[in-house]
Image (cartoon, rainbow, N blue to C red):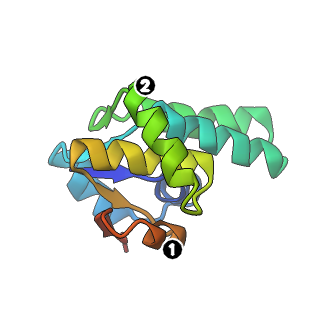
Amino acid sequence: MDYLDANVLWGWSMQGKHIAYLREAVENRQACTSLFTLAEMHYGMTGKGFPKERIIAALEKIVSSSGIRFIPATEEDFLLALKLEERGLKLFDALHAALCLRNGFRLATLDEDFGKIKELQRVQPS
């Protein structure tokens, strides 16, 4: 299963990118993410000055997609994320990586910072 990073979901929900990759992953029920991803998107879009209505529309599009599973986080995930943060990741990225490592997911991302975590499997959607 592929865990969808915020930049992949951003591209899809805001710009119509990564359509072929996401269509296959979602239709095959092989796509997941977490509420941390939505929080990261909200934070980023707010910081870029997007209107509240546009932010809500983008996030609702993701939440209403029946093929994307939302993965819950545990206390252990958070503690692992703190350790991964020490290896050079931002907290949201460290949380994504921790969830992927615990669950054996590949991380679908365009972010090269995840290369700092060698044990993390990544896929770059086209």
Q: Position of residue 111 (x, y in %)?
A: 52, 68
In the rendered image, the residue lying farthest to the left is 28
Q: At 54% from the left edge and 43% from the top edge, which residue is drawn?
A: 82
Q: Secondary structure at mark 2?
A: helix
Q: Which residue is mark 2?
A: 75
Q: At 28% from the left edge and 65% from the top edge, which residue is drawn?
A: 121
Comparing labels 1 and 2, the label whose residue is closer to the camera: 2
The one nearer the camera, 89 or 15, is 89
Three-letter amino acid code of the residue under disc 1? Glu
The one nearer the camera, 70 or 52, is 70
Where on the picture, by quarter, is residue 107? Answer: bottom left
Q: At 51% from the left edge and 74% from the top edge, which residue is drawn?
A: 112
> Can the viewer see residue 107?
yes
In the rendered image, the residue lying farthest to the right is 49
Left or right of 46, for residue 124: left
Three-letter amino acid code of the residue under disc 2? Glu
Q: Which mark is residue 38?
A: none
Query: Is the residue marked by circle 1 packed among few (<14), some (14-19), or many (20+) residues within 10 Å?
Result: few
- Asked if residue 66 is positioned above or below residue 98 in the image, the reply reads above
Q: Position of residue 10 (x, y in %)?
A: 55, 54
Q: At 18% from the left edge and 42% from the top edge, which residue is drawn?
A: 29
Q: Are marks 1 and 2 in contact (CB under 8 Å)?
A: no
Q: Which residue is mark 1?
A: 112
- Asked if residue 126 is positioned above or below residue 62 in the image, the reply reads below
Query: Is the residue marked by circle 2 packed among few (<14), some (14-19), or many (20+) residues within 10 Å?
Result: few
N-terminal of the pair, mark 1 or mark 2, is: 2
Mark-to-mark CA distance, 1 and 2: 26 Å
